[in-house]
Image: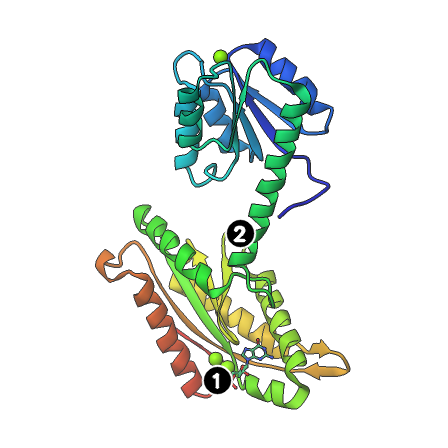
Amino acid sequence: MSNDTKKDNILIVDDASLNIEMVANILRKEGYQMFFARNGETALGLTKSVDFDLILLDIVMPEMDGYKVCEILKQNTKTKDVPVIFLTAKTDTESIVKGFETGGVDYIGKPFNPPELLARVKTHLQLRHAYEEIKLLSITDSLTGCYNRSSISERLPREIQRARRYNRSLSLILCDIDYFKKVNDTYGHQAGDQTLKKFVQYIQGMIRQKIDWVARYGGEEFLIVLPETDIRGAHCLAERIRIYISKSLIQVQKNEIRITSSFGVTGFNSDTPHEIISVENIIRHSDKYLYQAKKEGRNRVKT
Ligand code: GH3
Ligand code: MG
Ligand code: MG
Ligand code: MG
């Protein structure tokens, strides 16, 4: 998300340290956090540990040239959206066109004009932040702030692939608030909205940050994805969430709302035959168990 207090990280890649110094002096004055690399390999290495907001990239360098570096950056999910501006002495049309074709967003010839360089950097940083904000909105459920439904089809296949590749377990919890219609009918739709928000907050507070994730699967139905967790662990967590929710009083305006919820848990581990592991299969199984939990009286976990 765009954040005014955060310094933008800019990487300068150039084999001549004099060039690096010149550019860095201009940008540092603007408060950017500067990083340097004298060759492509070092630059690519740095991108693994630092999140860059923009990269200024020389083309003529020994060993790996700037085009190659840019190509590699564009193939990597972590760096493909980082704007790359070529900064180079090569100013013939063919080289410029190639710069854009390999994924550069801009192309500046050397010797460069400092105010113009700065203006271009600022513009591309603004575009980058606007793009990130839109991207975040497109995967977020606007009411609860968790992932939305469409991001499940983006994220879940990747989780499954990773778990299968490294022979790890992966579990899913599908949960649904019991008799939620009654909350709306009794307290109003807005109170219902607040209840949904609280429900997600409780869950977020009980899962591992940055590893587990929650997505809104439907109206008052949520999917919790638990990498490196076997079914038993997932069942325990679902049970803890169930108890916590059922004991909590959700304060909405003057009302104290009490809800319960039902859970369907499924998952796989390294022993599970690969051919039966798929997005459709594991969601279908969690749905089946959730349905059972509802049928058997609600406020329970089925595995
Ligand atoms: P069950 O125990 O079988 O799950 O009963 P239920 O009433 O929770 O289930 P049902 O599917 O009949 O109703 C779900 C309700 O959730 C109906 C719908 O109006 C409400 N709902 C869905 N999305 C939202 C939302 O964003 N805000 C509010 N306030 N209510 C919502
Ligand atoms: Mg050079
Ligand atoms: Mg419900
Ligand atoms: Mg439902």
| 34 is higher (above) or lower (below) than 202 | above
Q: Give the image location of residue 205, x and y in percent.
A: 61, 61
Q: Which mark is residue 110?
A: none
Q: Earlier in the sequence, mark 1 or mark 2?
A: 2
Residue kind at label 2, given as amino acid type: Lys
Tell me which residue sits at (57%, 10%) in the image. 17
Q: Give the image location of residue 226, x and y in percent.
A: 45, 58
Tell me which residue sits at (47%, 26%) in the image. 45
Please give the residue where the numbered disc 2 appears in the rendered image. Answer: 135
| Crowding near the residue tagged with mark 2, few <14, some 14–19, many ≥20 C-alpha atoms within 10 Å | few
In the image as oriented, which residue stretches furthest toward the right?
254
Q: Which mark is residue 298?
A: 1
Observer-nearest residue: 67 or 257? 67
Quarter where residue 248 is shown: bottom right
Tell me which residue sits at (43%, 28%) in the image. 70
Residue kind at label 1, given as amino acid type: Arg
Tell me which residue sits at (42%, 87%) in the image. 296
| Disc 1 residue: CB within 8 Å of ligand 1 | yes
